Image (cartoon, rainbow, N blue to C red):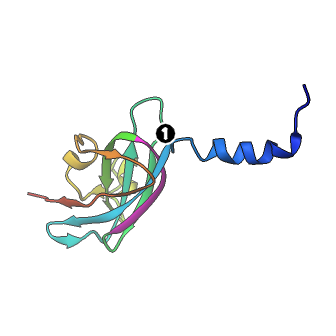
Amino acid sequence: MRINWTLWPAMVLVTAGCSKPTTGDVSGTVTIDGKPADIAVIRFEPPAPGLPMSATVKDGQYAVTEVPIGEARVWISSRKVLKDPPPDAPPASAFGTETIPEKYNAKSQVKVMIEGKANVHNFDLTTK
């Protein structure tokens, strides 16, 4: 049997087009008490063993690429940097104090589904 190697590139292109994406891009807005988040970090954490993907939120807008498809826990954080922390302050305080309630970061139960290539998720946070 003789193999026609001239068709090989076409076969590779056809089979590559049939695979499902494993990641998607996510964009949207983050507001805090109705106002666009000035500056923050948003992170999408897939179930193990996936790696979290994050981006900076600026003027209420964010865009994250290559987030694994499936359910992801959302973590949103913003810190007020202390210029002159007190001498007895713990080392972590050099990074500032969290300005967003922990229900959106350390204790976040916010989850979204990442599907396909383009996803839009908007988050309206409240501090009360």
53 sits to left or right of 10: left
- Give the mark count: 1
Q: Nearer the viewer, residue 97 or 20?
A: 20
Q: Nearer the viewer, residue 93 or 123?
A: 123
Looking at this rendering, what residue extends furthest in the right direction?
2
The picture places residue 5, in percent across and down from the top left corner, at 88, 40
107 sits to left or right of 10: left
The picture places residue 6, in percent across and down from the top left corner, at 87, 46
- On whether residue 68 falls in the magenta region, the answer is yes
The amino acid type, in three-letter code, at marker 1 is: Leu
Q: Is residue 63 visible?
A: yes
Q: Nearer the viewer, residue 29 or 89?
A: 29
33 sits to left or right of 88: left
* Residues drawn in magenta: 61-69
Q: Is residue 83 visible?
A: no
- Please say if 51 is above or below 118: above
The picture places residue 118, in percent across and down from the top left corner, at 41, 57
